[in-house]
């Protein structure tokens, strides 16, 4: 039985980013040679590619995922998509997500105030859910995956 790793789909080379581009990083693929790779992107299935950019916006102690132009709150949609993904992928051995992403960033995601100014760095919506669902697995990103 091979080990399983969840990796952000854009890092794997999928053209799934909001701008229709990819952020393929060959060294991540090489590091997980022999693993069963589980691609992950909660945004593309919901909103298509390309799509309006989203941001994490703080409202007091609450953080919501808001579309940049339309100002639509898509937090609940994303959370449901991520929960469904987790339910289908119960057992994993490693997780590598895209830094700075409103979905996948781990401590690197810009958290904005209601005027669009960065107030701090934090976690994306998927990272928050993954930290609970996969509590025993350290979440890495493309910048620090090598010591998994």
Image (cartoon, helix red, strand yellow):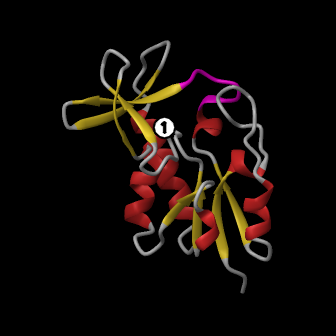
Mainly helix, strand or loop, the magenta region?
Answer: loop
Neighbourhood count class around disc 1 (C-alpha, 10 Å): few under 14, some 14–19, many 20 upward: many
Q: In the structure shown, which secondary structural element does the residue marked by tag 1 occupy? A: loop
Residue drawn at point x = 42 percent, y = 16 percent: 71
Coordinates of residue 112 in the picture (x, y in percent): 36, 27
Residue 143, located in which quarter of the rendered image?
Answer: bottom right
Coordinates of residue 126 in the picture (x, y in percent): 47, 49
Residue drawn at point x = 66 percent, y = 73 percent: 4
Give the magenta range: 47-53
Residue that label 1 marks:
102
Residue 144, located in which quarter of the rendered image?
Answer: bottom right
The relative height of residue 71 versus residue 66 in the rendered view (above or below) is: above
User: Image quadrant for the N terminus?
Assistant: bottom right
Residue drawn at point x = 48 percent, y = 72 percent: 137
Left or right of 22, for residue 95: left
Q: Is residue 122 magenta?
A: no
Residue drawn at point x = 53 percent, y = 70 percent: 90
């Amino acid at each position: 039985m091979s080990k399983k790793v969840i990796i952000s789909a854009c890092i794997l080379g999928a053209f799934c980013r909001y701008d229709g581009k990819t952020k393929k990083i060959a060294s991540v693929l090489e590091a997980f040679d022999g693993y069963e790779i589980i691609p992950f992107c909660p945004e593309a299935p919901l909103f298509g590619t390309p799509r309006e950019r989203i941001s994490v916006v703080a409202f007091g102690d609450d953080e919501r995922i808001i579309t940049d132009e339309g100002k639509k709150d898509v937090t609940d949609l994303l959370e449901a998509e991520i929960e469904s993904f987790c339910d289908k992928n119960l057992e994993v051995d490693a997780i590598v997500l895209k830094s700075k992403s409103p979905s996948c960033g781990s401590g690197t995601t810009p958290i904005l105030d209601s005027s669009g100014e960065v107030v701090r760095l934090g976690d994306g919506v998927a990272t928050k859910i993954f930290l609970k669902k996969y509590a025993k697995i350290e979440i890495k990103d493309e910048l620090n995956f090598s010591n998994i």
